[in-house]
Each structure stands twice: as structure tokens, then as C-alpha cells.
């Protein structure tokens, strides 16, 4: 069984819950790491809570891995799978400082919320990286680390000479409490006495401008510190989850899956036969049946997503759980291969229909992501088709890297620029009679501005911010000013905004 050696190995295997003080005694520079952890927590609160998924999150991701590597050492990246996920997470973190598309920022933030716990807790995992069981096991290990060693900071601060360290701990706690009480009582006392309010007006204004938000960030960071530091302590001495001994996977009669696969295969053959009439019959054939060609061409993608997931949910268990003997097994493999092929044909049909729609109405961000989604589903189906030939092949061993690689590719594609170029080219060539400039201005990122400047600046557009009608040149100027304002704050800076603002 393979798992990355990302921390010091536990002596004598898994042990019961350990005393945080005993864990921390042999750790050099424990207080330094506690201070670094507190600084990271303040940074995390400052970026993610107060500014959202922007360039500040790039700093937080890089800071987390710097702290993790300093704490655990290079053994954390000993396994190839750990190094790959490390580089992928760093790239996802870097995207917040490169692009300004809020769809990708939100999706990448959600991806990091999944991938970072999976990577961080890999040292105590009982399963190799390609087993689906890690999707529940590693998050549980991560949560156990967060909540299982909350006394670790106190153990670090009180280690050594007990008298001096306890007084230091009391002094730090008293200082934090005094700061919080002063910040709370100063405005209350000012409201109770006009003379005191006048005497402290400048002080209160200074505190309100410079320290109110900072104080909240500090307090929330200190609240978060015991959880994160406890997680680091658990990673230094990882303990796998106590799970019952693995039992042999149950096997089912292949005839059960044969009946299900046969029904699906027949259904999809009928569906493809009907759909081919629409593909080759054209608009006249559909109009004769009261169906809009545009509605028919653009529909079906999300349904195909559900169909693909359902087909894989039937096909993979059929190949995994069935008895691999007798005629039923041979028929099952044949029907599984037919189902995978039919699913691929359905994807080709959906792609054809989407292409017809894009040809008529142009490209959009959603349609571009539709093409990417179809390509990813085709790769998963080809992987499933290969499994019908080699049943012992682990589907997730190929599907997980394909998913990461696919997301890496689409993050590197200048999606908004391509959408804007397509729309502007169609409008300038006369292929499209109108252009949705408001969509390109406000729904997408700053990458569209260079293409919008190719249009007539006197074009009248709707200003989404104040509801008025303005010239396109004025709105582009406002968007560039917004980009410049974002670049003025390191939390919201991005390469995309810098290029759009025209600043060096």
C-alpha cells in the first residue's frame, strides 16, 4: 500500500491520542512556529474573509505550503503524487493573481478547499492516491487534526521553565484582553460624556480608521490559531483512522447488470435514431414538427452530463462487482463497451448541436465551458471503455489525473479574450447584426476590453452600475479605472487588471 511519507513516522505504528506537551517537547523552535502559525491565520482571515478569492489568497496558499514544508521538512513531498498535487495547488493559488474572471476565481477557491485538505492529510492515509476512499478518509483526518489538539499552543508556551513561561502566557492573554476591552469601552464612554468625547475625538478617529478592522482580523486570527497549530501537531505524528479490516469486495451475479445494461443500450439506440433525423433533416424537418431549430440546437448539454454520470455509475460497478466467469461476464463486457460507445456518440451529437448554435449566435463563456465539459466527459468515457477491455484497470487512477490536467488546461486558456474576439469579429464582418457589449463589459473579466476597443466608441450601451445609457468608449474608460483601483491594493491586484489599466 502506497502513501506519501510526509511527516516523521510514528514509532511502533498507530498509537492512541497523545499528550500535546509530549509531542512538542522534542520539536525545535516550537514557539517560533506558533508565532508563524498565528501570522498565517491573520493573513488567511485578512485575505479570504475580508477580500474574498483575490490575489491575497495567492499569498495565503504559498504561505501555507511554506509553513507546512518548514514544519514537516522535505519528506512531505517524498511521493510523486504529493509533488504533483503540490505544484497543482500552487498553480491554482497563482491564478488569483493572474486572471480577473470571477467564475474561475470562485471555482478555483472551491477546488482548493477540497484539494488542500486531501494533500495536507496524505501522510496518515491508509489508501493510495487513486482510491476513491481518500475522498472521505483524508477530510476526516484533516478535521481530526483541526479539533484534536487544541491545547497544543498552551503546551508550547508553557514548555521549559514553568514559572517564567506561565507568566509570559498570562501577560499575552492579559494584553489581548485589555486591548479588546479598551476598544469596546472607549466609544461607550465617549457616548456617555460629551467632554470625554471631545477630548478623545482624534484618538477614536485614529483607532476607527487604522485599528478597528485590524483588531478584528487579529482577534479572528488568534481564534483560528489553536486549530491550525493543532493540525500541524497532528501532521508531525500522523495517526491513521481506526477502520475495520478490509474485507473482500462483495460480488453480484452478472445477470443483474446484464439486464440493466441491455435496457440502457436499447434506449440509447432509439434516442440516437430519433436524434439523427433532426441532425440530418435540418430546420425544415424540425419546423414541420413545431420545434424551433435554435432551441433544439442549444439544448441537451446538461442532460448529457446527467446521462454520462448515470452511465458511468452503472458501467463501473458492473465491471467491478460482477462475477468474472461464465457467459454472463462476457455479455456484460460487450454491453458495457456498447454503452460507452453510445455515450461517446451522444456527446458527439451534443457537440455538433452546440457547434450549430455557436455558428448562428457566436461564442459565449458558457458555450466555451460547454465544449470543455464535453471534452472531459469524452476522456472519462474513453477511460471507461478501456476498462471494459482490462477489467482490473483502476478507473480513478486515470480519471483523477485527467480531471486535474483538464482543469489546469482550461485555466490556461484566455477564455474571455476568445469570447470577445469571436463576438467582435462576427459583428465587424456583418455575420452578426448586433453585439451584446454589456455582457462582454460586465459579465466577463478585463481581458475583453482590448477587443471591445475595436468597436465604434460612440456605440450606445447600458451602464449596469447606474442604469443609464452611455457611449461604449466612456464605459471602457470606467472599466479601466476600476482595474487601476484594484491594482492599487495588493489584496485585489491581478495581472489581468494591470494589463487592462495600462499601468507599467
Image (cartoon, grey):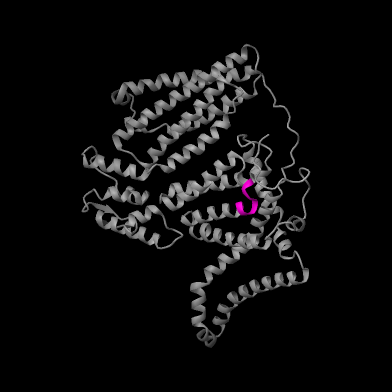
Q: Residue at x 46, y 51 (%)?
A: 96
Q: Residue at x 65, y 72 (%)?
A: 177
Q: Quadrant of residue 173?
A: bottom right
> Magenta part of the protein: which range?
68-75
Image quadrant for the N terminus?
top right
Residue farthest to the bottom, as pictured: 195
Q: Residue at x 29, y 46 (%)?
A: 436
Q: Quadrant of residue 20?
A: bottom right
Q: Residue at x 59, y 42 (%)?
A: 82
Image quadrant for the C terminus?
bottom left
Residue 393 relative to residue 94: left or right: right
Instruction: Residue 63: give x, y in percent of width and height.
Output: 55, 55
- Vertical relation: 105 (above or below) 364: below
Residue 285 part of the magenta-drawn span: no
Residue 399 relative to residue 140: left or right: left
Instruction: Residue 165: give x, y in percent of width and height.
Output: 73, 69
Instruction: Residue 361: give x, y in percent of width and height.
Output: 30, 37
Instruction: Residue 47: give x, y in percent of width and height.
Output: 51, 59
Identify the main secondary structure in magenta. Answer: helix
Residue 305 relative to residue 215: left or right: left
Q: In terms of depth relative to the viewer, which is nearer, 248 or 282?
A: 248
Residue 72 relative to residue 413: left or right: right
Amino acid at each position: 500500500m502506497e502513501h506519501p511519507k510526509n511527516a516523521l513516522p510514528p514509532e511502533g505504528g498507530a498509537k492512541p491520542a497523545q499528550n500535546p506537551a509530549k509531542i512538542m517537547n522534542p520539536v525545535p523552535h516550537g514557539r517560533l512556529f506558533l508565532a508563524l502559525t498565528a501570522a498565517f491565520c491573520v493573513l488567511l482571515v485578512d485575505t479570504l474573509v475580508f477580500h474574498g478569492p483575490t490575489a491575497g489568497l495567492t499569498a495565503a496558499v504559498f504561505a501555507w505550503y511554506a509553513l507546512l514544508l518548514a514544519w514537516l521538512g522535505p519528506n512531505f513531498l517524498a511521493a510523486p503524487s504529493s509533488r504533483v498535487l503540490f505544484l497543482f495547488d500552487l498553480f491554482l493559488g497563482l491564478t488569483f493573481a493572474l486572471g480577473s474572471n470571477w467564475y474561475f476565481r470562485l471555482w478555483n477557491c472551491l477546488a482548493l478547499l477540497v484539494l488542500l485538505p486531501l494533500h495536507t492529510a496524505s501522510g496518515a492515509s491508509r489508501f493510495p492516491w487513486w482510491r476513491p476512499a481518500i475522498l472521505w478518509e483524508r477530510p476526516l483526518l484533516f478535521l481530526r487534526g483541526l479539533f484534536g489538539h487544541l491545547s497544543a499552543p498552551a503546551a508550547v508556551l508553557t514548555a521549559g521553565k514553568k514559572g517564567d513561561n506561565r507568566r509570559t502566557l498570562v501577560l499575552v492573554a492579559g494584553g489581548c484582553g485589555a486591548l479588546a476591552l479598551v476598544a469596546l469601552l472607549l466609544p461607550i464612554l465617549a457616548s456617555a460624556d460629551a467632554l470625554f468625547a471631545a477630548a478623545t475625538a482624534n484618538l477614536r478617529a485614529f483607532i476607527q480608521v487604522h485599528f478597528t478592522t485590524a483588531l478584528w482580523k487579529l482577534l479572528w486570527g488568534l481564534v483560528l490559531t489553536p486549530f491550525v497549530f493543532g493540525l500541524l501537531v497532528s501532521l508531525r505524528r500522523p495517526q491513521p483512522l481506526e477502520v475495520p479490516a478490509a474485507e473482500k469486495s462483495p460480488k453480484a451475479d452478472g445477470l443483474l447488470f446484464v439486464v440493466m445494461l441491455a435496457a440502457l443500450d436499447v434506449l440509447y439506440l432509439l434516442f440516437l435514431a430519433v436524434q439523427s433525423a433532426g441532425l440530418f433533416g435540418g430546420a425544415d424537418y424540425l419546423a414541420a414538427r413545431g420545434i424551433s431549430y435554435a432551441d433544439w440546437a442549444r439544448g441537451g448539454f446538461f442532460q448529457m452530463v446527467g446521462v454520462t454520470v448515470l452511465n458511468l455509475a452503472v458501467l463501473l460497478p458492473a465491471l467491478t462487482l460482477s462475477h468474472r466467469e461464465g457467459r454472463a461476464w462476457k455479455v456484460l463486457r460487450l454491453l458495457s463497451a456498447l454503452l460507452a460507445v453510445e455515450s461517446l456518440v451522444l456527446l458527439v451529437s451534443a457537440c455538433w448541436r452546440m457547434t450549430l448554435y455557436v455558428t448562428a449566435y457566436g461564442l459565449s463563456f458558457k458555450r466555451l465551458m460547454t465544449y470543455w465539459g464535453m471534452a472531459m466527459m469524452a476522456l472519462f468515457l474513453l477511460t471507461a471503455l478501456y476498462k471494459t477491455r482490462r477489467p482490473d484497470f483502476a478507473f480513478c487512477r486515470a480519471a483523477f489525473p485527467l480531471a486535474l490536467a483538464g482543469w489546469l488546461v482550461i485555466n490556461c486558456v484566455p477564455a474571455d479574450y476568445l469570447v470577445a474576439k469571436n463576438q467582435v469579429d462576427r459583428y465587424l464582418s456583418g455575420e452578426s447584426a448586433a453585439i451584446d457589449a454589456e455582457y462582454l463589459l460586465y459579465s466577463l473579466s478585463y481581458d475583453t476590453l482590448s477587443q471591445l476597443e475595436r468597436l465604434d466608441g460612440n456605440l450606445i450601451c447600458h451602464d449596469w452600475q447606474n442604469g443609464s445609457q452611455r457611449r461604449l468608449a466612456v464605459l471602457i474608460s470606467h472599466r479601466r479605472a476600476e482595474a487601476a483601483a484594484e491594482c492599487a491594493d495588493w489584496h485585489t491586484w491581478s495581472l489581468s487588471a494591470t494589463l487592462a489599466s495600462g499601468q507599467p
